Image (tube, helix red, strand yellow):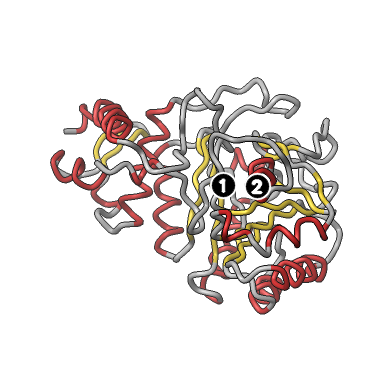
Amino acid sequence: MIRVSAGTAACLGLSSNRMDAYPTTAYLLSGKQCLMKCSFCPQRAGGNNVLNRLGRINWPEYSWDEVAKKLVHAEAEGIKRICLQSVRHTDGIETLVRIVDRLKSSSDLPLSVSAWIGDEREAAALIDAGVERISVSIDVINPETYKEIKGGSLQNRLDLLFSCAGKVPGKMSTHLICGLGESEVEALTLIDKLQQAGVAIALFAFVPLRGTAMEGKEAPPVDFYRRIQAGHYLFREKVVEMDSFKFEQGRLVSFGLPEKDLINSLSDGTAFQTSGCPHCNRPYYNERPGGVIYNYHRTLNKQESEKVLAELLGSLKAGY
């Protein structure tokens, strides 16, 4: 059996649910019980586990045969990539490799894997099996908060990620969750280092989920997240370097660009769309329909782009 995100199941015809937005990546989830104790996650070990949920999304379970038959025709349904996510478990890398083999036999679509890997050898085994990209999720940006929320050492995971990025260049990704106690200068400093190392970054805003240890914590202000999104995009597109940024007490006040140049760089709204692997749009993974949209899962229309850009510029006025 394999879990499939509700949106993916609807897109592939595994369910009859109707969605107002469909994924462009097929999201799958393997594993029954996670060993990690991440305070923000419904899959947390020792917590009030909700095994059919990850993020804000339901993940119903289907047989491998059902999923394999649908993946054969996934591209015709608008799917451009498969993303296999796995909880941390006691099985070795061999279990993941077997799943990868199974997926590769059903589809020629590029395959990403987001899983706990322990060393470069395990990353190499996944690449050899046909995985195009591997995500080592960092999630929490501040070292002390990382220890509290995830347990263990942030530096150890970063060392592994950077090491793998050197061994398999252009094939590593990570997840960063903004709004977990880090300052904007901390977030953007790490984003800059990761991108210089060739690591693709999937940005998330923290969203409190019912049943988790952090359900009472507030989501971050949207302007805080917009500044980090914009900085991430400007680094990625090589528009500006970190040295140009100006901060006051850890808060970004200027990107170091003339306002006209900043507007030209951000006016199409791409900076505020979902980031990560190519064709990853994650509809409503990070937000409720009708609520604050942190990551747009589609191209922004003119009105949306103008609104988001005006909010961003308004939050930066002190820096110009």
Residue pictured at 28% horizontal, 54% vertical: 241
Q: Mark 1–mark 2 contact, CB under 8 Å?
A: yes
Which residue bears the numbered disc 2? Answer: 8
Which residue bears the numbered disc 1? Answer: 23
Looking at the figure, which quarter contains the N terminus? bottom right
Residue 96 located left or right of residue 21? right
Q: Secondary structure at mark 1?
A: loop
Residue pictured at 85% horizontal, 48% vertical: 32
Residue 52 located left or right of residue 182? right
In the image, residue 250 lies at what x, y percent?
37, 35
Q: In the rendered structure, find residue 302 and report the number of the disc placed on it.
A: none
Looking at the figure, which quarter contains the C terminus? top left
In the image, residue 34 lies at what x, y percent?
80, 47
Q: Nearer the viewer, residue 54 or 221?
A: 54
Classify 10 Å Cα crowding around label 1: few (below 14), some (14-19), many (20 and above).
Answer: many
Instruction: Work out whether 85 lies above or below 106.
Output: above
Disc 1 residue type (three-letter): Pro
Q: Is residue 210 visible?
A: yes
In the image, residue 23 lies at what x, y percent?
56, 47
Q: CA distance from mark 1 to mark 2?
A: 6 Å
Residue pictured at 56% horizontal, 43% vertical: 22
Q: Residue 75 sits in which quadrant?
A: bottom right
